[in-house]
Amino acid sequence: MKTLKDTAVGSTVTVARLHGEGALKRRIMDMGVTRGVEIYVRKVAPLGDPIEVTVRGYELSIRKADAENIEVA
């Protein structure tokens, strides 16, 4: 299982599945990250947290803990 946290900078991936329960999963989905959407990894902060991505045409910063719950293909 490859997660968004493991994705290299400059890569474009497709969301395969969201893990997590309740409010965590809802918050990720509210940011526009749903199954089948493409995510481009723009950059990663020096200490690895947060990860800056482009999703649905806008820039988004995702914490490493949240990125672990996004399974990508």
Image: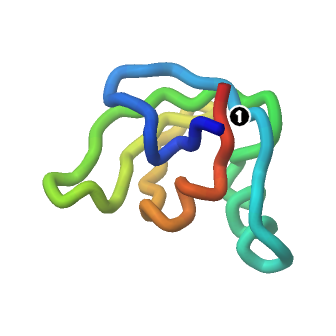
In this rendering, position of residue 50 left or right of residue 67: left
Residue 53 or residue 2, whichever sits in front:
2
Which image quadrant for residue 26?
A: bottom right
Q: Outermost residue, front direction? A: 1
Q: Residue at x 65, y 49 (%)?
A: 70
Left or right? Give the position of 21 relative to 73: right
Of the residues shown, which amino acid type is indicated by label 1? Val
| Quadrant including the C terminus | top right
Up the image or down, 24 lies above or below 36; here it is: below
- Of residues 65 and 37, the one nearer the viewer is 65
Q: Quadrant of residue 28?
A: bottom right
On screen, 37 above or below 45? above
Q: Position of residue 4 (x, y in %)?
A: 53, 42
In the displayed structure, does residue 14 sit left or right of residue 46? right
Q: Nearer the viewer, residue 50 or 58?
A: 50
Identify the residue at the far bottom of this view.
Answer: 23
**41 above or below 23?**
above
Residue at 80% x, 29% y is: 36
Q: Quadrant of the N terminus?
A: top right
Image coloring type: rainbow
Numbered disc 1: secondary structure: strand
Q: Residue at x 79, y 42 (%)?
A: 17
Instruction: Name the spot of residue 16 as percent of width and height, x first.
Output: 77, 34
Q: Position of residue 47 (x, y in %)?
A: 18, 60
Measured from the top left, where is residue 51 in percent x and y?
A: 37, 50
- Count numbered badges in the picture: 1
Q: Report the side of 66 relative to 11 (left or right).
A: right
Q: Residues within 10 Å of mark 1 (few under 14, many from 20)?
A: some
Name which residue lies at 71% across and 68% down.
27
Q: Which residue is mark 1?
A: 15
